[in-house]
Image (cartoon, rainbow, N blue to C red):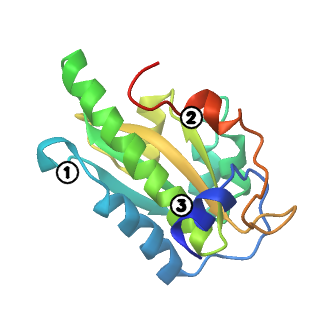
Amino acid sequence: MQTLDAIRARRNVRTYRPDPVPDADLDVIAAAAWLAPSASNRQHRIVIIVTDPGQLQELSRVWRGAGHIARAPAAIALVVPHAEDDRTRLIDYFDLGQAMYAMTVAAADLGIGSGHASVGDQDAARAILGVPDDYDVAFLLGIGYPADRPLKPVVKPDRLPVDEVVRHGHW
């Protein structure tokens, strides 16, 4: 796909076919997080690819909106060092947002769906993934082939008209 086609095709997918996602494709998706920008090029994030059904089931319980992780053939966890101050935490989470979006676009480019989730129960998430206590498991991304319909660029997205959102030079 062309970049804008992948962006137009990307949507939150939370129901997946049971087909496994090839390791090579999971590596490409994870590499998108690795390539994403970070403040001062700090590169604080760690990316954990999970394909074990038992782990996926357990991870689905770390947040009330993570149920789809149990039904995904794979998930990717984004981990970051625990920030002691709000400014660092904000910067790290902005960087994680960029990494997450890069992964969703890379997945869409491969025809693979993705659905993000937050993490509420840090202790459980750390235990499931073997993450040290001085790190936070910030986000999860369910990965799999959409069960309902394949990804394809949306011609008329359900968005406000572009001229209501995009301004030039002033309000």
Q: Are marks 1 and 3 in contact (CB under 8 Å)?
A: no
Please state which amino acid type lies under the numbered disc 2.
Val
Residue 33 visible in the shown view: yes
Disc tally is: 3
* Residue beneath the point at 47% across and 18% down: 171
Percent across and percent down for residue 161 are 70, 35
Q: Amino acid at mark 1?
A: Gln
Pointer 2: residues within 10 angstroms few (<14), some, or many (20+)?
Answer: many
Query: Crowding at label 3, few (<14), some or many (≥20) Cα neighbours within 10 Å?
Result: many
Residue 165 found in image quarter: top right
Q: Work out whether residue 52 can be spotted.
A: no
N-terminal of the pair, mark 2 or mark 1, is 1
Q: For this view, does 27 lie left or right of residue 82? A: right
- x, y percent for residue 128: 46, 47
Look at the picture and state if 80 lies above or below 43: above
Residue for badge 1: 43
The quarter of the picture where residue 94 lies is: top left
Per the model, the C-alpha gap separating discs 1 and 3 is: 20 Å
What's the residue at 56%, 54% (across, down)? 55
Label 3 sits on residue: 105
Q: Which residue is mark 2?
A: 62
Q: Secondary structure at mark 1?
A: loop
Image quadrant containing the N terminus: bottom right
Q: Which kind of residue does numbered mark 3 sit on?
A: Val
Q: How many angstroms separate mark 2 from mark 1 (CA)?
A: 25 Å
Q: Picture quarter containing residue 19?
A: bottom right
Q: Is residue 127 left or right of residue 115?
A: left
* First in sequence: mark 3 vs mark 2: 2
Q: Which mark is residue 79?
A: none
